[in-house]
Amino acid sequence: MIQRLLLSGCVLVIGGLCQMPVQAQTPTSKPAPTSQPANQTVTPAETRQFANAVKQVLAISREAEKQATQAIQSEGLTEQRFDEIFRSQNNPQQKPSKPVETGERQKYDRVIAKLTQISKDNDSKVETAVKKEGLEIPRFNQIFQIVRSNPQLRQQVQDMIRQ
């Protein structure tokens, strides 16, 4: 279950990156022909940069999963118990299998603090990885949206990631 929570967290991190430029880049009603290719097309070099950046983001996410599991275990909680407590904290109608004791609650709080730090570190690592591949975050986000809506380009990126 923790795997799904962590994966959701990673998706949110990536999703957060992908939504950043939407606010800053409202297209005009009639874009100039010279600006359209920059916004609507992706060069082969950018496709490669994007695929490489996504590879890095996936590696960062996998490492974060390991760190999160270690954070839970280091406090003496099982992933299952952490998940029960987490769900009950976020949905009071969903009760854990047994009541949360004070010591257990303290362990849970320490894990949450560690997971918050892991998430902050990941945000920084993801941004660095994207920039290291030669893309700025807004352009990465634009490419993400284009790849998402273009099946042929999406397949090309997936193939590059598998290489």
Image: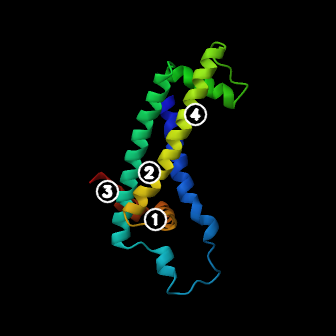
The numbered dot on residue 159 is 3
The front one of 88 and 64 is: 64
The numbered dot on residue 113 is 4
The front one of 24 and 117 is: 117
Q: Which residue is mark 1?
A: 150
Relative image position of residue 72 (x, y in whole percent):
49, 26
The front one of 130 and 11 is: 130
Name which residue type carries label 2.
Answer: Lys
Q: Nearest to the eye among marks 3 and 4: give it.
A: 4
Q: CA distance from mark 3 to mark 2?
A: 24 Å
Neighbour tally class for label 4: few under 14, some 14-19, many 20 plus, Cα within 10 Å: few
Residue at the extreme bottom? 33
**Relative height, residue 80 to residue 7 (above, below):** above
**Relative height, residue 104 to residue 31 (above, below):** above
Mark 1 / mark 3, whichever is N-terminal: 1
Q: Report whether residue 8 is seen.
A: no
- For the point 37% across and 46% down, which residue is it? 59
Mark 3 / mark 4, whichever is N-terminal: 4
Q: Which residue is mark 2?
A: 125
Mark 3 / mark 2, whichever is N-terminal: 2
**Relative height, residue 115 to residue 142 (above, below):** above
